[in-house]
Amino acid sequence: MTKKIGFIGAGNMAEAMIKGIIDTGLYTSDEIIASEVYAPRRKYIAEKLGIEVHEGNEVLAKSTKFIVLSVKPQQIEEVLAGIKGHLKKDHLIMSIAAGVTLATLESYAPLCKIIRVMPNQPCMVLASASAFSRGTKATSEDCSTVENVLKAVGICYEVKESLLDAVTGVSGSGPAYAYMMIEALSDGGVLMGLSRDVATKLAAQTLLGAAKTILETGEHPGKMKDIVCSPGGTTIEAVKVLEDLGLRSALINAVEAAALKSAEMGKK
Ligand SMILES: NC(=O)C1=CN([C@@H]2O[C@H](COP(=O)(O)OP(=O)(O)OC[C@H]3O[C@@H](n4cnc5c(N)ncnc54)[C@H](O)[C@@H]3O)[C@@H](O)[C@H]2O)C=CC1
Ligand SMILES: O=C(O)[C@@H]1CCC=N1
């Protein structure tokens, strides 16, 4: 057991998390191992992040006690079946797969301690929002191990497993909604004559600034919205358009749709 952490599946999320963990100094690149079936991806990750990347998952299971399952939900069963013989009771498995329940994970790896996490993609810039639930064998120390990783790359909360679907709808899938908003705001800026580059940077910084304001002041978003809306001014004209077109209900329905999909995936 020479490595501190191992990622099975070196895709987008694994890359984002590993980059965040290295950048923040929690683990060094030589303390991290990954396994990945796709050869060009192995080469890319090894070169970009300077970590050991293997084709098979067995080496990884033998090299570390802390395994992150970062493959797609549909691949979890096959991956765990493939390394079952190497999984011992001191292995801690952190799954980030959407919709795969603790009960399902525990049925695939009955000896192991398991924690189910819903992170989000901005872990690569140390600004992720995650939540986790512990399985029946996971100890408080295991939760701390997982929290150390999640807190190194952002904020995290422990929640009841039944709430992880809601977390998926808000923050797991949420970056996609925010990227769409940035893209659309930028389109609006271009429509009104700004260059694409300036419009995108202004839009992104505006979402970042609004988010920082809520997190740092703890103020209600509605109160801050009111402060921006001058009586008879420009913003309230735009707010009326957004209300007429249903921005709020579109977002509420989007969160519900993603959460329901996550719950549906958990029933399989
Ligand atoms: N993309 C996102 O923003 C988020 C994704 N998640 C969850 O994270 C997990 C990974 O998602 P992504 O990184 O987006 O997917 P991805 O498709 O980019 O990464 C999965 C990687 O696993 C590799 N792989 C497939 N089978 C394998 C096997 N048997 N052994 C080793 N490697 C194998 C694939 O080649 C691929 O590189 C999913 O379960 C998803 O539900 C959770 C939160 C956010
Ligand atoms: O779309 C998905 O299924 C994954 C889980 C949350 C974000 N991406």
Image: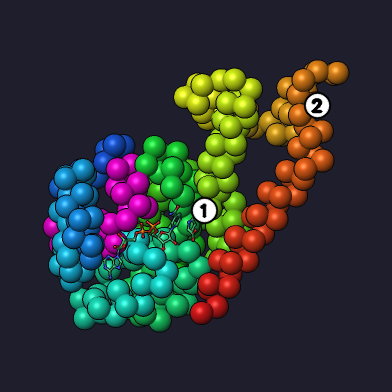
The answer to whether the beta carbon of the residue marked 1 is less than 8 Å from any atom of ligand 2 is: yes
Pick whichever, 91 or 184, lies toward us. Answer: 184
The amino acid at mark 2 is Glu
Residue 140 percent location from the top left of the image = 41, 59
Span highlighted in magenta in the image: 1-21
* In the image: residue 110, left or right of residue 5: right
Along the polypeptide, which appears first: circle 2 or circle 1?
1
Instruction: Quickly name the residue at label 1.
Output: 172
Q: Secondary structure at mark 2?
A: helix
Q: Residue at x 40, y 77 (%)?
A: 106
Q: Residues within 10 Å of mark 1 (few under 14, many from 20)?
A: many
User: Quick check: can you spot residue 177?
Assistant: yes
Residue assigned mark 2:
237
- At x 54% / y 24%, what residue is drawn? 199
Does residue 14 lie above or below 91 as drawn?
above
Q: Is residue 132 magenta?
A: no
Q: Residues within 10 Å of mark 2 (few under 14, many from 20)?
A: few
Q: Position of residue 203 (x, y in %)?
A: 56, 28
93 relative to 129, above or below: below
Which of 89 and 20 lies nearest the eye of the viewer? 20
Please check the rendered image and state whether residue 10 is part of the magenta-colored stretch, yes or no.
yes
From the viewer's perspective, tell me whether residue 219 is left or right of residue 26: right
Check disc 1 and report its element: helix, strand or loop.
helix
Question: Does the residue tagged 2 have its C-beta within 8 Å of any atom of ligand 2?
Answer: no
Rounded to the nearest angstrom, the CA distance separating label 2 from label 1 is: 32 Å
From the viewer's side, name the closer residue of 231 and 189. Answer: 189
Give the amino acid type for the residue marked by disc 1 in the picture: Gly
Q: Residue at x 56, y 20 (%)?
A: 194
